[in-house]
Amino acid sequence: MKQHKGRIWLSVIVVLMLLLLGWTVWQNVRVSERIDNSVKSTTMLEGEYSLDGGEWKSINNTKPINEHFHKAVFKGKFTKQVKANHTTTMDIVSKNVWYTLYDSSGEVLDEYRRSPGDMEEGSGYMAEKMINTPGYYIMTEYVQIEPEFKSDDEITLVVEYPYELDTESFSDCFYVMTSYSDGLYLHFFFEILPVGLMFLLVCFFGVFFFPIASGLLGRIDFRYIAFGSLCFFGGLYMVIDKISGYMNLWIIDPTVCMMTDKLAGCFFAIAVLIYLRSLLRGKTVKIIANCVVTAFFALTVLCVILHSTNTADMMATAGIRYLAVIVLAAVMAVLLCIEIRGKKGFVLIDYLISWLPLGIFLMIDMFDFYLHISGSKYLQIGLAITIIYQMVRFGMDFSRQYKEAIRYQQVQRELYEAKVSVMVSQIRPHFMYNALSSIAILCKLDPDTAYTATVTFSDYLRGNMDSLRQTAPVPFTTELEHLKKYLYIEKLRFADKLNIEYDIQDTDFEIPLLSIQPLVENAVKHGVGMKEDGGTVKISTRETETAHEVIIEDDGVGFDVNETKDDGRSHIGMENTKKRLHEMCGGEVIITSEIGKGTAARVIIPKKEETDK
């Protein structure tokens, strides 16, 4: 039933994915039809520009300026779109820059550069105190209403990037959108929203798919939980990064817009580090990884405090954070390399694919941040590869879990039948007849002993019946107590011909109930019981480096272990015992015997390995 519900959930998720992907593609096809009346350009000026006092170049409003700068000067006239298309609004979108617009006489037409009096006293906005932080800002100009905008006048636009570390190109910081009305919203809805929905799908995987996947596997898998967190914060980071230029439409304070964008990146970096930590198993490397995650989290908190106190905003500390990501990601890579030492086959491939694509593309993005090689963000490719692989891995895990569940049910049925067989073999009429006959004789000869024997025999039968309800291994001490009751009854029958010795050095392990008794029964009945003057049965336990051992020895008649005899014995009980030991605790039974000297049965229970919870 559990697996059936799991398959239903997977089907629903796949259908939702296909519907969302189809809708997104359809919306992208319609983009060109819906935003014809909106024009996005570099500056909406025809003329030339210069970056940081360099050579003058022609303005191409259809081509982004991917050069880094601190001060950009544009000179020219408004483009034909402003003059001829009856445009009523012009939205100037700026991120982390100040700008000033001058007319031909040098008078300021408009500017975005806050001073202490720009915001009302006590307004509660962070920008009121952060005078030196541009933040993310959108200025809407009504071109036809404002008389100072003359189409034939030469306009000078000055854009200033106030941070020392030039991490963003000009077109990342500034562009102009013109339209009849609400062009910015139209552009957001039909161009940004479909892509944003794709990233929200990644968030969906993080919130629902991978946590549910962990539950469907029947255990809490920290690796899937950590990867779900990675997907959520990764999708959130990409959504906010995509719409960052539009946040001032809904968040009034420009500095809060900046902090929201940068914090999304910080949380994504923390999620990446936590995911990489989830791949580690060694105690020492996990401690180091925990320190790495804690260090970056502390750095993020410090940056927020510096930003909130107007000591250094989130852009001013961006270089330190990116450098920290490079260093800490390199440390994680070293820890992962240590972790995969000695691993082979699928386990090695699993580890490599789980972190290499994400780690490599993350490092490329970090170096590109400093070196300005391409300006592209390759981390999305690494994240996509990792998501696809984790989905494939979950499918493999779920399939294996399903097969194991079927196998578990089959094994439980077989174990139940085996326990019934063992119980019946112990309470067969012949055994009960011998036990009751011995007790009857004691009632006349020694009533007190008869009373003890009756209680012991009753407890023994109750233990056999209780075994039918026991589905898990029990402490060895429980098995030993039940075994002593059986041997007490057999001692009544054989008297001085049966000697029992115990050498119990180890009891700190578990064993299937009634798994030692069949071996002891063979030693009593077919070992010393077949010997004219009887003998001794010795039960001992010991602990080795890798296992716990139970040894049952007798000095009876012995037998040839390589010879198969049709001697009337029931060998089904022995086979069931071996199967139960193997299926329930990975144990095995090794029997050695020598004719005329006796038999030894050694039960080996491997020690449980410590696993990472």
Image (cartoon, rainbow, N blue to C red):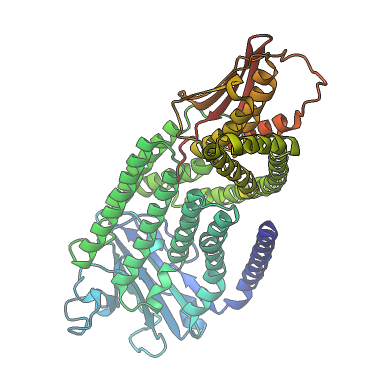
The image shows residue 411, relative to residue 600, as above or below, that is below
Furthest-front residue in view? Answer: 444
Quarter of the image with the N terminus is bottom right
Up the image or down, 394 lies above or below 35; here it is above
User: Can you give x and y, in whole percent of width and height, for residue 517 in the image?
Assistant: 62, 32
State whether residue 376 appears in this view.
Answer: yes
- Position of 226 relative to 247 (above/below): above
Above or below: residue 364 compared with residue 93: above
User: What residue is at 20 percent from the left and 71 percent from the top?
Assistant: 131
Q: Please indicate whether residue 579 sits to the left or right of residue 169 in the image.
A: right
Instruction: State left or right for residue 324 relative to residue 446.
Output: left
Which of these two is toward me, 336 or 424?
424
Q: Nearer the viewer, residue 268 or 542?
A: 542
Q: Quadrant of residue 568?
A: top right
Horizontally, residue 590 falls left or right of residue 227, namely right
Q: Kindly identify the residue that appears in the image at 40 percent across and 62 percent down.
A: 172
Name which residue lies at 40% across and 85% down. 143
Answer yes or no: is residue 377 visible. Answer: no
Quadrant position of residue 262: bottom left
Q: Residue furthest right?
A: 566
In the figure, residue 347 lies in which quadrant?
top right
- Locate residue 266, reporting x and y percent: 35, 57
User: Closer to the camera, 168 or 529?
Assistant: 529
Where residue 201 appears, as percent x and y from the top left, is 56, 64
Q: 461 or 96, which is in the foreground?
A: 461
In percent of width and height, residue 226 lies at 46, 52
Task: Give the residue displayed 67% in from the left and 15% down from the top.
Answer: 531
